[in-house]
Amino acid sequence: MLEPFLVRALIAAVGVGLVAAPLGCLVVWRRMSYFGATIAHGGLLGVALGLALEIDLTLGVVVVALIIGGLLVGLGRQRIVPADSLLGILSHAALAGGIVAASRLAGQRLDLMGYLFGDVLAVSNSDLAWLGVGGALVLGVIAALWRTLVAVAVHEELAQAEGLHVARAEAALVVLLALTVAIAMKIVGVLLIVAFLVMPAAAARPFASTPEAMAAIAAVIGGVGAALGLWLSMSADVPGGPAIVLVLSAASLCAIAWSARKGGG
Amino acid sequence: MSGSKSNSGLGASASSGHAQGQHSHAHSSHEDCGHHHEPMPARGSRRASAPTGEVLVSGRGMTMSRGGRNILDHVDIDIAAGEIVTLIGPNGAGKTSLVRVLLGLEPPDAGTVTRSPGLVVGYVPQRFERDAAIPMTVQRFLTLGARAPRDRLQHCLEEVGAGGIADRQLAQLSGGELQRVVLARALVREPKLLVLDEPARGVDHLGEADLYALIGRLRDERGLGVLLVSHDLHVVMAQSDRVLCINRHVCCHGVPETVAQHPEYVRLFGDAARAFGIYQHHHDHAHGLGGEPLPPIAAGGGDKSHA
């Protein structure tokens, strides 16, 4: 029989893998992986904020992630500094700010390594509850907006001309990313969250013929990869989050190589 | 951006209902631009008078500048149900900007756009960039604009001459196939207004003739209003009810001439040539560096576009 902490770890890892994968497809299609990383980096700042204000840490993460997302969208309207440079600025500002704030405000109460790379074996029941509620919310919003999100990803102008709300879809993606960061951070860490978004999607792409199939296959890859990675982490006695990311990266690299050999299809 | 307009006379716009004779001396006496017309019998598929359908979209005094450059300068346009309006003009004349404003993709700096309430628009953009990162069958792509059962999707594909490709990946289509599929996506929506930005780009000449024939059929059978953009100053659909030539401002407008007998086109396209019209257009006035029309050399003439 598995130890309770292992059961919690397994549920958490597989849950994050399942929830992040469909969102990850949208992130891949919209070329938002660096955008997602920037929002994730804000997570650490959110934890520090939560500790300083003595509010719920998850709430702090959501708030800071939303602020960074809003900044990205707002500052992205100017044209003088290109979008990827803007991301480079904000993502590192968020990370540096988070580490400085954490060291100043939190002192020893904060397990910095745990927040950067995750600590899947330390997942508590309340973390699981957050994951359950937040994950259901993320999947529910994605399902409700799926048609619009896909149409906008395929061709923004055409979607807008056909009467879809492009700005709303844009905002929804930012909120979804912020929520996902908040629920996944303790489990996989701010530096590795994007891997859970992008890798299953990339691994699923060569095997999918529709957007829906890609999201479903990515979810399976994310879930199975998380379980395999956790097993790897237990048997080799290495950290859980990085072990999962290694398994997922192997899956995505194999898929990409396979599709390149096949001729790009 | 809402509110309907009654259809009283559609000729309301300066851009419609020009009598042909008005331009018969255009080349010598015009204040804006003149065009050659070789007298032609009216074709069956083309109405001599302005159609009387409901006005679907209407722009008044649309003005837009970007980066200090005037892109649109007080452009008026109406598109009514059951008519094909062709927008021509040289590259950089503001055709695509005008379309974007009419579609509500961009607000004009000045002027108004009025669309009939609940108007369903089918749009075929000038360039459709595919993204191989998104797996997409043709069939799934068609339902992005509107849900529809499979047989209806198939029907729309057949209508555009792309019947056998429903299960292919979008990324693997040829340029011409893609163009047809994008048009089919617009048709699945059962639009009242069809907006096509340079639809002949990327399709071969035979496909072009088919395309224009299809557009004419859609107008005749379903009473669609069609706005067609072309940068080719010489080729305009014979079925066009009205042609609007813009170069940031409305240069001129009126009923197009057909080229069924034009030897050049008959030689090039054979039977297909009958689907084509020619609209010969000679710019008789210069434009300044900023695009503003320079004062005409000769006064007089009957063009109402600057009235």
Image (cartoon, rainbow, N blue to C red):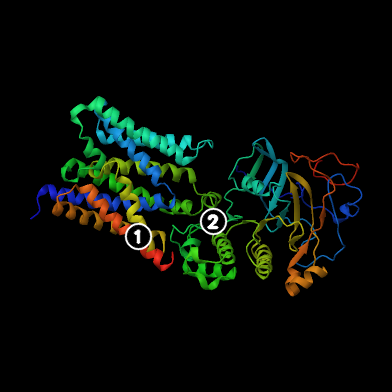
Q: Amino acid at mark 1?
A: Ala
Name the image quarter holding residue B276.
Answer: bottom right
Label 1: which residue? A204
In the picture, measured across the screen, residue B133 lies left or right of residue A216, that is right
Q: Is residue B62 visible?
A: no
In the picture, measured across the screen, residue A94 lies left or right of residue A183, that is right
In this view, the residue in front, A119 or B225, is A119
Q: Is residue B301 visible?
A: yes
- Residue B156 sits above or below residue A230 on the image: below
Label 2: few (<14), some (14–19) or many (≥20) C-alpha neighbours in 10 Å: few
Image spot of residue A6 (x, y percent)? 13, 50
Image spot of residue A166 (x, y percent)? 49, 46
Image spot of residue A243 (x, y percent)? 22, 51
Q: Chain of mark 1?
A: A
Q: Chain of mark 2?
A: B
Label 2: which residue? B129
Image spot of residue A61 (x, y percent)? 30, 35
Question: Disc 1 on helix, strand or loop?
Answer: helix
- Residue at point 58%, 45% (across, down): B105
Label 1: few (<14), some (14–19) or many (≥20) C-alpha neighbours in 10 Å: many
- Residue A161 sits above or below residue B69 on the image: below
Question: How many discs mark residues in the rendered view?
Answer: 2
- Residue at point 37%, 43% (across, down): A36
In the picture, measured across the screen, residue B204 lies left or right of residue A38, that is right
* The N terminus of chain B, quarter of image: top right
* The C terminus of chain B, quarter of image: top right
- Residue B73 sits above or below residue A253 on the image: above
Question: Disc 2 on helix, strand or loop?
Answer: loop
Are the residues tagged 2 and 1 within 8 Å (C-beta)? Answer: no
Query: Residue A232's mark?
Result: none
In the picture, measured across the screen, residue A51 lies left or right of residue B192, that is left
Tell me the CA gap for discs 2 and 1.
22 Å
